[in-house]
Each structure stands twice: as structure tokens, then as C-alpha cells.
Image: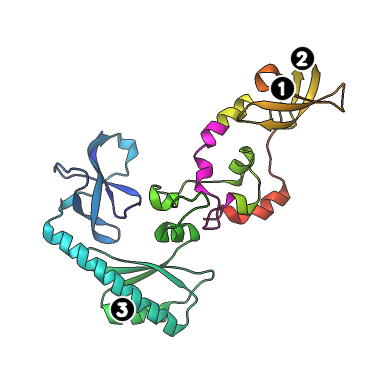
Amino acid sequence: MTEIIGVRFKSIGKIYYFSPNKLKIDTDSHVIVETARGVECGEVVIGNRLVEDNEINAPLKPVIRIATPDDIKIVEKNRIKEKDAFAICEEKIAHHKLNMNLIDVECTFDNNKLLFYFSSETRVDFRELVKDLAAVFRTRIELRQIGVRDEAKLLGGLGVCGRPFCCKSFLGEFVPVSIKMAKEQGLSLNPAKISGSCGRLMCCLKYEQNAYDELLRITPKVGAFVKTADGNGHVEDVNLITGLLKVRLNNKEDVVNSYNRNDVVLIKDAVIRLNSDEINALKALEDK
């Protein structure tokens, strides 16, 4: 077992583990730590806790110190600097006529680096922009092109459900979502119905997938061969939630009866597959 604390550097972001360095650190406090980007100030969201060794990537970096009031003032000044840097960068982008949308700016705690996040549908040659920004701010400049999911997470907004984006509200990391999930959940494979505002598959498809996996395990699929009280037949339609099956009987091909999944015996199950047309039409929705 290893003692850790969990630190988050954005309000809804990934949680990183650090060694508390023999300090007792409470949640909601702030700490100064060293990261791959430099020295940063983060919020503690997990207090001192023991976790299994296989849950961490050893060795853990130690906490430098618990943030002091002076450290918090530095963070506040950096937030102001970020806003100024955002406005200046937008002016420079317009000056160089670059096809890019500036999304966010971050300043590391030690002022050693400014990170500019942008989106673009194409690759951007921003070398001259970097030179201009370095001349203005006299610090290391890093530009990062982000995808549409990350853009939605940073900007926020309302989803088709009318609620704030999940990625902006509580999802620390994006979950893998696939077209296969939509198919298994019996959803219309219309891109407008299953994609979020970011243009990719809605993250919420993942939330109920475990329940659907269990229902699929106990429910004959469309095309399955089953035995009913009225004879054998093939399943033509399935309602996974209610367990209602519509079966076309082999001895009465013009008759389609309804049965509960518990009232039929599975002889040979079918497999849910995406056809090539569906894959080609919806492939772009899975891109991150």
C-alpha cells in the first residue's frame, strides 16, 4: 500500500496522485507540486489515503508544500495574466491570418510557461505566432491543438437534454464510446440523434451500457431462433427494457406473436453487427 493525495488542476479535470511527503493534507486545500509542465498549484480532492501499489505509477512526486496565502495571490495574478494573454494572442492570430480558434490560456504557477489551446480543422503553421508571443511575454510559449471533445469541455454549454455538458460538469476524463453501444441500445443510428454538441457520440451512451450488457445476455436478439408455446420461430423485434419479443412462427409465417423473454426457450441466438454502410456513415462520430 502507498499513501497518496489526489490533486486536480482544473475544476473538472483529471485527478493526479502525489506523495503527501509526510504531511497531513485535507481536501479542498491547495498544494504546490511539480508536474511535467513545471511547478503548479492544485486543489486537493482526495486527502491522505492508502491505495494498492498497482493503482499508481511509481515513483510518485512529493508535495513541495501546502499553498500559503502568498501562493494563492500568485495564482490570482496568473489568472489575470491569462486573460491579458488571451486577448493579445487573438490579435496576433488575426494579424497573421491564421485559421485557428483560440480556446483557453494557462499560465504555470512559476510563470515558466504559457500554454495556448486552440482548435482548427486543419494543421496550422504557428511558428511566427510563437515568436511574437515569446517576444511579448518573455517566457516559454506552447501552443496545443485540441480536438472537439476537449473544446466542448473547456467552453461548456447545454446538451440536447437541456443540462450542462457532462464533460464540463463532472467527467474528469472522457470515457470510450462506440457506435456498437448505440446499436445495442436500440437507438436510431441517425448522427443528429446520438451525437452531442461537439459532433461526437454522446458520452451518456456509456452510462447505461452495463445494464444493457446484462439485458442482452438474457434476451434473445433480433434474428434469434426460439421455441415458444405456439411453436418455433424467429425473433423479429425486441424491447430490451420490457423484455417483450415479437416472434414470427415458422408454422404460421403470416402470424407474429408477442412473448416475454422468460416465456421462450433460446435455440440459437443472433449477433448484433454493424453493416459496412453504417460503419462508413458513422465512423467520424467515434473520433476523439
How far apart marks 1 and 3 lie (CA) works out to 70 Å
Mark 1 / mark 2, whichever is N-terminal = 2
**Residue at the spot of label 3:** 134
Q: Residues within 10 Å of mark 3 (few under 14, many from 20)?
A: some
| 106 is higher (above) or lower (below) than 11 | below
Mark 2 / mark 3, whichever is N-terminal = 3
Please report the bounds of the magenta region as a residue range: 194-212
**Residue at the spot of label 2:** 229
> What label sits on residue 18 in the rendered view?
none
Q: Residue at x 64, y 39 (%)?
A: 186
Amino acid carrying label 2: it is Ala
Left or right of 139? Residue 165 is right
Helix, strand or loop at disc 2?
loop
Amino acid carrying label 1: it is Tyr
**Residue at the spot of label 1:** 259
The chosen color scheme is rainbow
